[in-house]
Image (cartoon, rainbow, N blue to C red):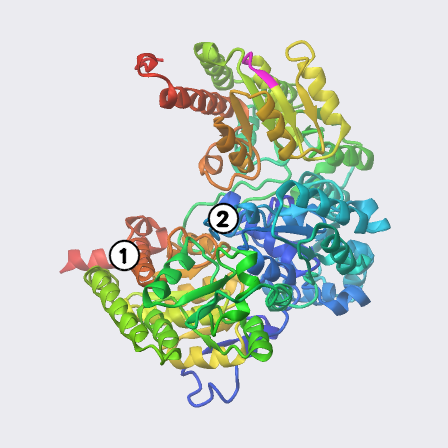
Amino acid sequence: MEILPDRQKQVRQTGANPGQDSAAPIACDKHSAAGSVSQRACVFCGSRVVLYPIADALHLVHGPIGCAAYTWDIRGALSSGPQLHRNSFSTDLREMDVIYGGEKKLYHALIELIDAHQPEAAFVYSTCIVGVIGDDVAAVCKKVTAEKGIPVLPVASEGFKGTKKDGYRAACEAVYRLVGTGSTEDVGPHSINILGDFNLAGETWIIRDYYKRMGIDVVACITGDARIADIRRAHGAKLNLVQCSGSMTALGKKMEADYGIPQKRVSYFGIEDMAAALYEAARFFPDDPTILERAEDLVREEVEAITPQLREYRRRLEGRKAAIYVGGAFKAFSLVRALKLLGMQTAVVGSQTGGPEDYVKLQEICDPGTIVVDDSNPLELAQFCLEADVDLFIGGVKERPIAYKLGIAFCDHNHERKEPLAGFVGMLNFAREVCNSVNSPVWQFAPRKRRKAVPAQHQEIAV
Amino acid sequence: MYAALGIHRCMPHSHGSQGCCSYHRSHLTRHHKEPAMATTSSFTEGASVFGGLSNMTQALKNIFSIYEPDIVAVHTTCLSEVIGDDIPMMIKKSQEDGTIPPGKHVIHTNTPSFTGSHVTGFANMVRSTLRYLAENTGTPRDQLNILPGYVDPADMREIKRLAGLMGVNAVVLPDTSNVLDTAQTGTYEMYPKGGATVDQIRSTGDSIATLALGHFASLPAATELENKCNVPSVPLDLPFGLGPTDAFIDALRQYGAADVPEQIEEERGRLVDLMGDLHQYFFEKRVAVCGDPDHVIALVQFLVELDMKPAYVFTGTPGQHFERRIAEILKDHAPNAIIKQNADMFELHQLMKREPVDLLIGNTYGKYIARAENVPLVRFGFPILDRAGHRCFPAAGYMGAMRLVEKMSDALLDKKDRECDEEWFELVQ
């Protein structure tokens, strides 16, 4: 197919040039070509989605109403307590504010909102125009911190300042200002932080429960169902388990440098990766071998519980093909593996924000012939799907209608998942969703499929 | 962006950071459950210092070489507005240096988020489209321009159906039917078959008149065309409910020199019949309405026709016209109604806590209030992110009004059936 010339280095087919895959890495980590229908968003988006799940904080978007309106309750990050985070408060900057500056408005908004909602902390997100008109957001935050006695944290998330990944970094910096400000007295010796899980559809709860059953304390989940008080004492944990390759690595690195807390990359998606994540934590505490024992018991129990049903789903999915287009590459690894477990082959795989090593690894774990792509667009994705004749698309909100238009099954692995996909039970949910969508009778009515089916019918008649 | 999608083979282009484009597309996709295409200038720090000219040039090059639209409709963002990018200059330059291929078009409008609302952006885009493209050739055409306003593809489809039944040739701009409500074919079309073509838009300058449906979304464009090409502008409300649909049909009759066919008479008759059948469930019902101003202005008239009592009438879009118009509609019927423009739903919620209503009509964001106050919600307007009906069935026209009546009575009766004491639970309503 035709690909924007600027983008050719961002698309690769595994096995197309044997031996070349890692020698000439896929081009990534770069800004989208101007004029492409990119599926990516901006720095602000990156910061907003990462901090969004912190439930007892006030999230104030300093900017025009649009930036707040489009991030109002869109994440599906559940909270077991306060629901304040679902609101996207806005300073609603207008023309006059752009001319005269928005600092006063920001100050008054913060005071009013803090009085009304009594949050444990406030995050103030800078948007594009704030970066251009030059409001001193940090100064206002400092002032309100002093007056109200809660941390008011500026997030340097001006939309144009890079890619979504830079937004993750800005979010980590903001969160990091909280770490180390609480007491770690009651933090036990076998304690961890869960970084980079956002409690979509309640996933953090599942993971937390697994660690608890192993005898490991979870000090803070950052940021799934997070509370400010937990983040403040997160430095007391002995280990950081980091999921979601892009978003929380920066925080993990900082905590490693300043507090000596090692970090390990994990994934809670799929049986193998989930089990590996539990063992990783267990092995980190060799002083108490019962932790590992409990982990093994837990894995055995959980896997046994889901295996019969998984086998049935696998039977119905064997040999089907999938396309994956997700935000982070780490998620893509897990998906490729999980699909393999279900007997499915990944024919197309891509991400918005993967790094060079990620793509090398992706090319390694996929079968030959798989198309690997960075920062794709709808036209490309649709074409890849048709060429590879996939049966399933895994992606987010913008990909769903494209898949459906093509008459292809879909699974949302983003904000709009309706059931938890993490953990062992999540694997079962994933299998159920994929199986039912792939085998749904509705796709057979797509004219494209019917056209293909017609010759087969003729053959049957001929025979 | 939504307005631009109603132009055939048009690529909306967002001149700013990537996020703006991404958010707008996601939002439209959530409402329409359809792919929404648009490109972005992908601003960086450099662009925001040195201006977005090179981004724009690069973008136009890429768009025309790969996506091959007939027309690119540029809308600005906060960022490009504040740094002062001169879009007409950029377009002119791109025309001169051949970046824009011959026969292709680039138009633009100014849509910073800090001025007005999404309705403002829509109105600006429609107006700019006519400003750029409409021509008066001096040879009148036997056709009417219909500016349908910020309504759903199903509504535009219904508006076209009514005009068709009347035998009126109509150019509908924008027309997102068959763009954002396409049939499933198993293939993906970047430019579906719907939308007003560039030729059609150009010809609006020779039309008999422009029916501007909606003061906020359509009238600015109709006025522009009147000034530019001397095509008379006919200000109307959105054709929601009985009265505004009557006015629309009457305008088609008058300016299109057409007779009202029996089929439309019958549709109207069935609506009136339904209103009579169900009127006992509606009278004295207190209603809170919030939404886009044109929608609310039309709907409130319908509520009055049904003898309901609008108690709170809100819009987030700024504009004094809204308050004046609603006050006039309600002056005899519900003089104590609280009417607010440029308002937010928090305030509406506080009022509803103080003095409750029987029914809330608004977009999906009303569901928080509906749940908190246990008030039935009828979803109406934009955006609807959690239900499907608006994608298939119009709210416009007599048929659409029947659907509104059904939805309102269902909402009221479902609540009663769910909550009333056993002895009042009735089989027949």
> Hey, what amino acid is under mark 1?
Ala
In this image, B117 relative to B411: left or right? Answer: right
Q: Main secondary structure of the magenta part?
A: loop
Residue B198 in view in this figure? no
Does residue A356 lie above or below B209 as drawn?
A: below
Of the two numbered discs 2 and 1 in the rendering, the one whose residue sits closer to the viewer: 2
The x and y percentages for residue A328 are 50, 68
Q: Outermost residue toward the left?
A: A463
Q: Chain of mark 2?
A: B
Residue at (52, 77) in percent of width and height: A261
In the foreground, A421 or B147: A421
Residue at (47, 45) in percent of width and height: B182
Between the residue at mark 2 and the residue at mark 1, the CA separation in whole angstroms equals: 26 Å
In this image, B268 relative to A404: left or right? Answer: right
| Residue at the spot of label 1 | A453
State the extent of the magenta-drawn residues as a range: B306-310
Does residue A37 lie above or below A249 as drawn?
A: above
In the foreground, B172 or B315: B315
Contact (CB < 8 A) between labels 2 and 1?
Answer: no
In the foreground, A439 or B129: A439
Residue at (80, 51) in percent of width and height: A103
In the foreground, B251 or A68: A68
| Residue at the spot of label 2 | B34
